[in-house]
Image (tube, rainbow, N blue to C red):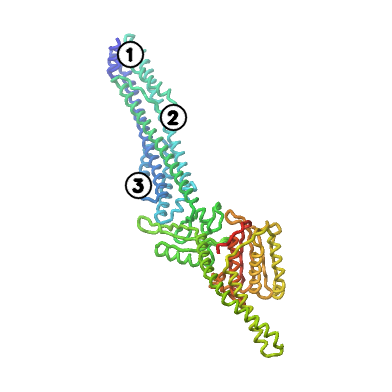
């Protein structure tokens, strides 16, 4: 019986119906017509189901091309390498035609067609924007593309496209479910026709018709059950019936179709996962690169032509700017020392024009008066065509090295000067003492009315001046020891100003002071610091015109990790010529003074260096001079290096 049933199931439906030929001719004809019509409708529905599959496949290809556009664009902008444009160009050539063909396949589906039309509009916009940005990158202006990615404009368009395509996929899935339901409805309709026609047939045909109905309905019920038991949005795996009739062929076709649909959906999901992982890797790589650049122990900057477009944290520290503030990179150039700015900018502009590397040494001037000396090197970066697209620059702080070299040179000069001073003290001081003593005795013996007395007074005066010069030379050249004690700087400044009341009054100078009483006590050699202040204030008085302004200010100032105090002395005098300014701390150099040996500022510098401090002088001819002194708050007694 089972073998007979299997043979019956393997028979085509037409042959099965022939078995019922004993049914009256009318019933057979009617059943044949109705059955043929049901099969035709079923075939139409199958064709529509196949068309739905082709639409979904074309939509998946369309989405893949959109992702290729985005991936190729981002890869090229981030790497500037031409081969990253290959997927972009390939997708650009095909995407519009694929979209048009997909739109044509949706005849009779107005809502899906409208969605694809909107996606086509967004894709054209996306292609045009990215093509313009790629051209801008090629022409040396990647900032627009970087801003485009950072601002998320392209991401927003991609999000709209994804939402539209997701809505399209849902509509197509609904259409697929609808067509599967229609097949089920056709099956039910055909069943009722056959059963109804069988009721009209002779009672003898009931068994045959029942077998035909069972042969057709059982596999279709299994298919309907498999489809109905699947979750929403999931393509089920349809069973394959071991039959050689149309139902068996149908189950094989539908099984193959469901397998292909699942395979394509898995590829789409894998592509999305890979793209998401790639984006995470790129973001991590970018963060790592930025972290390395920001925390490098030297200044790193980038210029487009002569315009600075990027500056890392350490470069802003070198310029005296807040490293955590996201400011204009050009602010770094504003911190160039005024004496170096024009030279550096003009030389670099010429190097950019010639497309060659540039190396120089210049200074940064901080707002608090601190000077940082840097070695700067700028290297041209070229594209594949040899054109300079930017300059990569590096600034290395050589302030400490420069100070060490300067101290070494001063130490060498002092060593030589010490030998000379010892010789001068031995060879000149004794004769000077004899000349002075003899002249003093002669002055006591000569009457005030004697015409020779003025000459003797000049001799005695010049002898004493030579003795003072010898003492200053010895004082400058000898190793300087300090005996630090704790004292309040404002009190010392008041003492100095009291000593110089007479010259200040003679020039009618207006004294302005800012000496906060809250300043912490300073540990230093009080007498030597007093000598420095007397010399500096006296110089300011001598440089000032009558009725000028003399300003003294003091405040706490930390340098690096060391707490200290700053002293500023500002006058409104004639100033110092720019060519003389670099030499003011050299021994025996004077500028605009009719008396003096030129050792005052040199000795001041020795004293400040012995305390581990710093002294700087800036001046503008015709406007005045500013002296900035910085001393650490605490130190141990030691012998100065110079």
Name the residue carrying label 2. 233
Residue in the image at 48% along x and 48% along y:
291
1 or 2: mark nearer the eye = 2
2 or 3: mark nearer the eye = 3
Q: Position of residue 337 (x, y in %)?
A: 53, 64
Give the quarter of the image for residue 515: bottom right
Q: Which circle marks residue 211 in the picture?
A: 1
For label 2, the crowd category at 10 Å Cα-Cα, with few meaning under 14, some 14 to 19 and many 20 or more, is: few
Q: Can residue 368 be spotted in the picture?
A: no
Where disc 3 sits, the SS reads: helix
Q: Are marks 1 and 2 in contact (CB under 8 Å)?
A: no
Pointer 3 or 1: first along the chain:
3
Whole-Å distance between the Cαs marked 1 and 2?
36 Å
**In the figure, is residue 238 to the left or right of 561?**
left
Where disc 2 sits, the SS reads: loop
Pointer 1 or 2: first along the chain:
1
Pointer 2 or 3: first along the chain:
3
Q: Position of residue 79 (x, y in %)?
A: 40, 49
Where disc 1 sits, the SS reads: helix
For label 1, the crowd category at 10 Å Cα-Cα, with few meaning under 14, some 14 to 19 and many 20 or more, is: some
From the image, which quarter does the C terminus lie in? bottom right
Q: Nearer the viewer, residue 457 or 634?
A: 457
Whole-Å distance between the Cαs marked 3 and 1?
62 Å
3 or 1: mark nearer the eye = 3
Q: Which circle marks residue 86 in the picture?
A: 3
Give the quarter of the image for residue 261: top left
For label 3, the crowd category at 10 Å Cα-Cα, with few meaning under 14, some 14 to 19 and many 20 or more, is: some
Give the quarter of the image for residue 435: bottom right
**Above/below status of 48 relative to 287:** above
Q: Position of residue 238 (x, y in %)?
A: 37, 24
**In the figure, is residue 212 to the left or right of 459?**
left
């Amino acid at each position: 019986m089972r073998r007979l049933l299997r043979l019956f199931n393997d028979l085509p439906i037409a042959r099965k119906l022939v078995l019922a030929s004993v049914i009256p001719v009318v019933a057979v004809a009617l059943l044949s017509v109705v059955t043929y019509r049901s099969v035709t409708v079923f075939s139409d529905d199958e064709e529509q189901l196949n068309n739905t599959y082709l639409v979904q496949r074309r939509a998946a290809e369309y989405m893949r091309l959109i992702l290729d556009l985005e991936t190729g664009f981002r890869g090229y902008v981030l790497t500037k390498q031409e081969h990253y444009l290959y997927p972009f160009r390939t997708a650009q050539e095909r995407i519009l035609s694929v979209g048009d063909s997909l739109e044509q396949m949706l005849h009779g589906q107005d809502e899906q067609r409208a969605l694809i039309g909107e996606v086509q509009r967004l894709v054209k916009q996306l292609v045009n924007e990215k093509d313009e940005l790629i051209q801008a990158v090629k022409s040396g202006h990647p900032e627009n593309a970087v801003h485009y990615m950072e601002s998320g404009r392209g991401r927003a368009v991609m999000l709209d496209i994804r939402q539209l395509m997701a809505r399209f996929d849902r509509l197509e899935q609904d259409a697929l479910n609808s067509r599967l339901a229609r097949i089920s409805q056709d099956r039910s309709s055909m069943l009722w026709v056959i059963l109804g026609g069988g009721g009209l047939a002779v009672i003898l045909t009931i068994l045959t018709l029942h077998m035909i109905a069972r042969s057709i309905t059982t596999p279709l019920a299994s298919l309907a059950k498999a489809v109905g038991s699947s979750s929403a949005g999931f393509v089920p795996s349809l069973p394959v019936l071991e039959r050689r009739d149309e139902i068996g062929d149908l189950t094989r076709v539908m099984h193959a179709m469901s397998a292909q649909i699942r395979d394509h959906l898995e590829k789409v999901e894998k592509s999305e996962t890979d793209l998401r992982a790639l984006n995470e890797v790129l973001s991590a790589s970018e963060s790592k690169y930025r972290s390395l650049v920001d925390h490098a122990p030297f200044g790193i900057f980038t210029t487009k032509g002569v315009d600075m477009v990027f500056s890392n944290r350490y470069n802003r520290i070198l310029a005296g700017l807040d490293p955590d503030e996201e400011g204009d990179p050009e602010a770094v150039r504003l911190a160039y020392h005024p004496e170096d700015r024009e030279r550096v900018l003009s030389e670099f502009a010429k190097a950019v024009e010639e497309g060659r590397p540039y190396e120089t040494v210049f200074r940064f001037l901080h707002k608090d008066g601190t000077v940082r000396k840097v070695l700067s090197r700028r290297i041209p970066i070229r594209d594949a065509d040899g054109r300079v697209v930017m300059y990569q620059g590096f600034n290395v702080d050589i302030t400490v090295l420069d100070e060490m070299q300067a101290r070494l040179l001063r130490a060498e000069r002092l060593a030589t000067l010490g030998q000379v001073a010892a010789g001068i003290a031995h060879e000149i001081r004794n004769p000077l003492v004899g000349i002075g003593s003899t002249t003093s005795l002669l002055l006591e013996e000569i009457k005030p009315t004697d015409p020779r007395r003025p000459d003797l007074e000049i001799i005695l005066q010049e002898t004493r001046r030579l003795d003072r010069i010898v003492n200053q030379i010895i004082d400058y050249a000898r190793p300087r020891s300090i005996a630090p004690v704790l004292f309040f700087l404002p009190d010392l400044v008041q003492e100095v100003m009291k000593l110089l009341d007479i010259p200040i009054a003679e020039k009618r100078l207006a004294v302005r002071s800012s000496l906060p009483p809250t300043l912490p006590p300073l540990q230093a050699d009080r007498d030597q610091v007093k000598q420095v202040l007397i010399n500096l204030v006296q110089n300011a008085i001598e440089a000032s015109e009558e009725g000028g302004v003399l300003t003294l200010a003091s405040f706490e100032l930390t340098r690096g990790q060391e707490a200290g105090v700053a002293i500023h002395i500002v006058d409104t005098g004639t100033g110092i010529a720019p060519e003389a300014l670099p030499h003011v701390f050299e021994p025996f150099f004077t500028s605009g003074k009719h008396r003096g040996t030129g050792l005052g500022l040199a000795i001041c510098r020795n004293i400040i260096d012995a305390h581990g401090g710093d002294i700087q002088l800036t001046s503008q001819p015709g406007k005045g001079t500013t002296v900035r002194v910085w001393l650490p708050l605490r130190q141990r007694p030691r012998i100065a290096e110079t």
